[in-house]
Amino acid sequence: LDLMKKGIKTDIVKRVLDACLKVGIAFHLYIIVGFPTETEKEALETLDFVLHKEYLNSPGFSCLPSLFGMEKDSPVTHNPSEYGLRSIMSPRGEDLGLGYFFEVEQGMSPEEAGEMYHYMIERLSQELCPFPYNYSLADGLLYIARIK
């Protein structure tokens, strides 16, 4: 979260989620897999955080992982060395494309991150109700109202 400059610490996220649990507020976690410099160990720690039993048992809990994609004019493309990148390549023949390919100096390669992403999807699918991946507000509120 620090390297992403999210402006929040993991311990604060945990406190907020615990407070939501205490008063019965449903929450959705959105996680990014494969941000430059992220290691396999860090990704698995994130998965362990998400798979916290109290979260899994709370009504309406959902989580959606996303594979990091580097986009044009992002902070990462403007400061590649700050994010541990060896190189950034734009797709050939894609002058209008927004995405870039990249190589890392440390952490998971984009290919390894893709494998981790699929592993996370598989693990989360085993633990969570599948509806959050097609989540709509109306369906979600109805679901939460009926399971309480």
Image: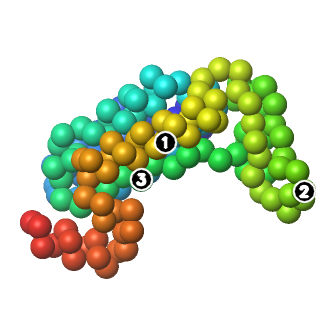
Count of all numbered marks drawn on residues in the image: 3
Q: Position of residue 26 (x, y in %)?
A: 25, 59
Report the amino acid beneath label 3: Leu
Q: Residue at 18% across / 59% down in the picture?
A: 59
Query: Against 143, is 45 above or below?
Result: above
Query: Against 52, is 138 above or below?
Result: below
Q: Is residue 52 left or right of residue 92?
A: left
Query: Against 43, is 72 above or below?
Result: below
**Sequence-wise, which precedes: disc 1 or disc 2?**
2
Q: Which residue is mark 2?
A: 93
Q: Residue at 12% across / 73% down in the picture?
A: 146
**Sequence-wise, which precedes: disc 3 or disc 1?**
3
Dot 1 lies on which element? helix
Q: Which residue is mark 3?
A: 64
Assess disc 2: are there few (<14), some (14-19) or many (≥20) residues with their C-alpha within 10 Å of its C-alpha.
Answer: few
Report the amino acid beneath label 2: Gly
**Sequence-wise, which precedes: disc 3 or disc 2?**
3
Q: Which residue is mark 1?
A: 117
Disc nearest the viewer among 3 and 2: 2
| Residue 108 in view of the camera | yes
Do callouts 1 and 2 mark residues in contact (Cβ within 8 Å)? Answer: no
